[in-house]
Amino acid sequence: MLVSLPRPDDFIRFASRGLFACDWQGVHRTRGFCNRYAMLSRPDTPIHLAEYPEQFHQLLRSTALPGVPFADSLTIDVRKLFHCEPPA
């Protein structure tokens, strides 16, 4: 875990299975938007695409964010990846 949470169980399970877990914690804020996903947990040993069953490879490739180095980034700025409408 990279942050302290009241109920970190799910994020601990993700990391224990080799997955990175990020969350956009400020998405519901009415001010002070950060527009970033923050990494909450990361695995000691990440799982790689080749380790998944073949039937999942296409799905995982289709949901990947090209150029986003999850393993090296504590935050991911969504404004750089997607067209985002400013809050009303």
Image (cartoon, rainbow, N blue to C red):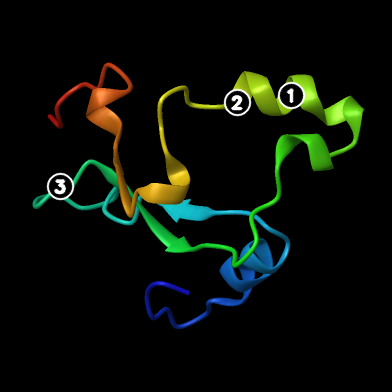
Residue picked out by circle 2: 63
Q: Secondary structure at mark 2?
A: helix
User: How packed is label 1: few (under 14 Cα within 10 Å), some, or many (20 or more)?
Assistant: few
CA gap between label 1 and label 3 equals 31 Å
Position of 30 compared to 15: left or right? left
Position of 84 compared to 37: left or right? left
Q: Do the residues under discs 1 and 2 have CB atoms within 8 angstroms?
A: yes
Q: Do the residues under discs 1 and 3 have CB atoms within 8 angstroms?
A: no
Tell me residue 46's x, y (percent).
64, 54
What residue sits 33% from the left and 56% below the top?
25
Is 1 placed above or below 35 here? Answer: below
Residue 27's tag is none
Circle 1: residue type: Leu
Tell me residue 50's x, y (percent).
79, 35
Residue 59's tag is 1
What residue sits 45% from the left and 44% below the top?
70
Circle 2: residue type: Thr
Circle 3: residue type: Phe
CA gap between label 1 and label 2 equals 6 Å
Q: Secondary structure at mark 1?
A: helix
Task: Report the number of numbered marks.
Answer: 3
Tell me residue 45's x, y (percent).
65, 61
Is 85 placed above or below 69 here? Answer: above
Q: For residue 49, what is the image quadrant?
A: top right
Q: For residue 74, what is the image quadrant?
A: bottom left
Q: Secondary structure at mark 3?
A: loop
Closest to the observer, 70 or 37: 70
Closest to the observer, 66 or 6: 66
Residue 33's tag is 3
